[in-house]
Image (spheres, rainbow, N blue to C red):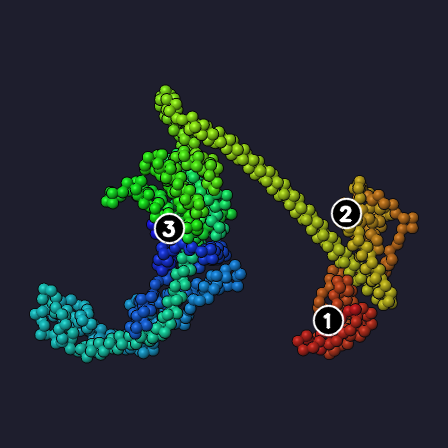
Amino acid sequence: MTEKYRLKLEYDKILNMLKDCAVSDMGKARCLETLPADNIKDVSRLQQETDEALNVIAYTGGNPMTPFDDVSEYLKLAQVGSVLSMKALLKIAGALSAARSVRRSLITEREDTPILSEMASRIATDRSLEEEITSAIISEDEMSDHASPELYDIRRHIRQVNDRVREKLNGFIHSSAMQKYLMDSIITVRNGRYVIPVKAEYRQQVPGLVHDQSGSGSTVFIEPISVVEAGNELKELMLKEQREIQRILRDFTLRIAPEASLIKSSLDIMANLDQLFARAFLARSMNANPPKINDRGVVRLKEARHPLLDPLKVVPLTIWLGEDFTTLVITGPNTGGKTVTLKTVGLLTLMAQAGMHIPAAYGSEVAVFDEVFADIGDEQSIEQSLSTFSSHMTNIVQILDSVSERSLVLFDELGAGTDPTEGAALAMSILETLLRRRVRTLATTHYSELKAFALNTIGVENASVEFDVESLRPTYRLSIGVPGKSNAFEISRKLGLSPEIISDASERLSRDQIRFEDVIANAEYHRAIAEKERVLAEEAHRETMRIRAEAEKEKKQLESQREEMLKKSKEDAKKLLKKAQTEAETIISELKKARNASGLKEHELHEMRKRLQDGIDEMGEGLAAARPQGGTRPEALKPGDRVFLEKLGTDATVLTAPDAKGDMSVQAGSMKLKANIKEVLLSAAKPAENAKKSRYEPKKPSGSSIQISQRRGEMELDLRGMTVEEALNEMGLFIDGARLNSIKNFSIIHGKGTGTLRSAVQNELKHIPDVKEFRLGRYGEGEDGVTIVTLK
């Protein structure tokens, strides 16, 4: 696309904004070189790249690009055999580090960044070379002692010789015999040699080599003869140090040279990525959105904003072109926003074709044009003897010679600068020519003839920018389908022009002109009414949506509360069942003791366990029972009364009268429970004449009290340290708990010892019907000290 037209639309200012979003010099340069693509495939790919970059930024929370230097010149030097400096090597290592960082950030398993992942996969890295350079070179003019063993050894010797020389010189300058010869008691360096300042008149008293003298000649700098040999050795070591440094630099250069082309290619990719992420950050700063792209010449911008205007002050515009009409004629007052409208359409088109998102609402659509022509602004030239009209016409001629069906043409004040009648005629002819060639055209004008032309020509549409006559200010709002009304008389009247003059001016207008202005005024009046009604309808719609949203929110809150209540009810039910299981275990404990005391048979005990489980099942079913309606809190109860247990949600029969604390025994189904009078309500259900008795009531051993066990089913039972009788009782309780908790496999730890406890445990297991099988532990399970049990 031609640079002249890009400059007219201020595309260069957008590129400067884009440049500020890049992090590297190469990326900034690439931003300034960004040009719009002219085919839909390339534009769609550019837009997808920007989308992917925004996805990465949203996912990582920052820019994956890191600053890097353009090391292209250093790579060329390495290829031609020059030895690279420490500065060059450090910059190359920095570029390799940046390349590795970018590659690591962009090559992921995410599926929404295929283009960026593919670009990153072509970036070459060499972490080994990068880290060797950064560990060997400390700064642009300093190499580490550990760059090579040879360098370390040379510098160690340099330090030793230095120390030896300084030690001799210190002894020399602190000698009382030498104090009168010295200008100052210091050691300094001249020409790379250690020297002392000696008064010129005592030059012969201090044997050694003179390396320098002061400007006044009063001081000579002498290297004492006693340190000359050490100084020579030091000089040789320093030369060796420089040779070793050059060798190390040469080795690094030789390693870089074969990879120079690959590194250069990676730098190009990184510069492109930097420009790509700059587009994404520019979109974020503009609050821009991705446009739809088409090759049908259709432009549909919604709530579009000129990117160079203050976003807090700019009035968004909605404009469309290319479907029902291909030419749009915009009229309205000066400073009303006509030129801004042209520039907004042209600039946003260029931005979209360059892969940038545009400051417009979602759903905006932009066509791909082969060129955007713009005749905007005053190009009169004194040197070329061109008037305003001539300069415009020269530009228009060039446009008409170059335009195609895939072009977008923008005319500002078409036909202006000459006789209005001739200018209007030329303007209509130019628009007619572009219309026949199906060129998308936007033109601004003040000519009434062009308004009529747009009304009477198929494929041409009127548009206008509004003007508030009351405040004498433009509103900057664009209305398509309505030509702009001339407000010259109204504005003049507001400004105080004599009514007689205005009336006389009106009479000079032709009847057709007056009728045309009246038609426009009438259309504008009805359009304004329709706009107000549309605004009211939108407000009503928004209010309806707000009320609906609040209703949905309240509905969700009610559903959430209901879910919470159901969840709480289920949790309460689980707690009650758990409590019932605990009480069942205490009954099992009593059954066990009753069996030991009364000689109860094992099959009878098994039957009682079954009945006990039936009672637990009945209690579980009772949890779903509804709370009785109209139940009252009893003041006193006696055995036989029917009550409703609130916590369990079921009816029960009172077995014992409440004690002083209100505690009593009740029977719910086959289960005997403890309850408090404050936890029950009087039940409407009457007890049966022959109330069902407990299916089993364990006998208490005479003279003993039953201890309530709180054991629950566990996966391991440790019997070590117990007597055989204690262990067998504990095992019986444990097995009962395991069965109630549906635990099929567990371990019994009895230890190895003498084997007495193990034999008693296994002998007892043989006589328990619930036991399917048992075995000794294997290696890793405890071996002979553990018995593994499986229940039926």
Residue at the right extreme of this rendering: 689
Query: Residue at coordinates 12% horizontally, 76% vertically from top-left?
Result: 207
> Where in the figure is residue 660, as x and y percent of width and height?
78, 46
**Mark 1 closeness class: few <14, some 14–19, many ≥20 residues within 10 Å:** many
> Where in the figure is residue 726, as x and y percent of width and height?
76, 68
**Occupied quadrant, residue 719:** bottom right
Amino acid type at circle 2 is Glu
User: Is residue 319 shown left or right of residue 24?
Assistant: right
Query: Residue at coordinates 13% horizontally, 70% vertically from top-left?
Result: 212
Please say if 505 is above or below 177. Answer: above
Q: Which residue is mark 1?
A: 748
* Earlier sequence position, callout 1 versus callout 3: 3
Q: Which mark is residue 402?
A: 3
Amino acid type at circle 3 is Ser
Element on which disc 2 rests:
loop
* Earlier sequence position, callout 1 versus callout 2: 2
User: Is residue 507 shown left or right of residue 626?
Assistant: left
Answer yes or no: is residue 277 visible: no
Element on which disc 1 rests:
strand
Answer yes or no: is residue 788 visible: yes
Residue at the left extreme of this rendering: 201
Q: Nearer the viewer, mark 2 or mark 3?
A: 3
**CA distance for labels 1 and 3:** 97 Å
Q: Which residue is mark 2?
A: 646
Amino acid type at circle 1 is Ile
Query: Residue at coordinates 88% horizontally, 54% vertically from top-left?
Result: 693
Total marks drawn?
Answer: 3
* Earlier sequence position, callout 2 versus callout 3: 3
**Mark 2 closeness class: few <14, some 14–19, many ≥20 residues within 10 Å:** some
Please say if 466 is above or below 654. Answer: above
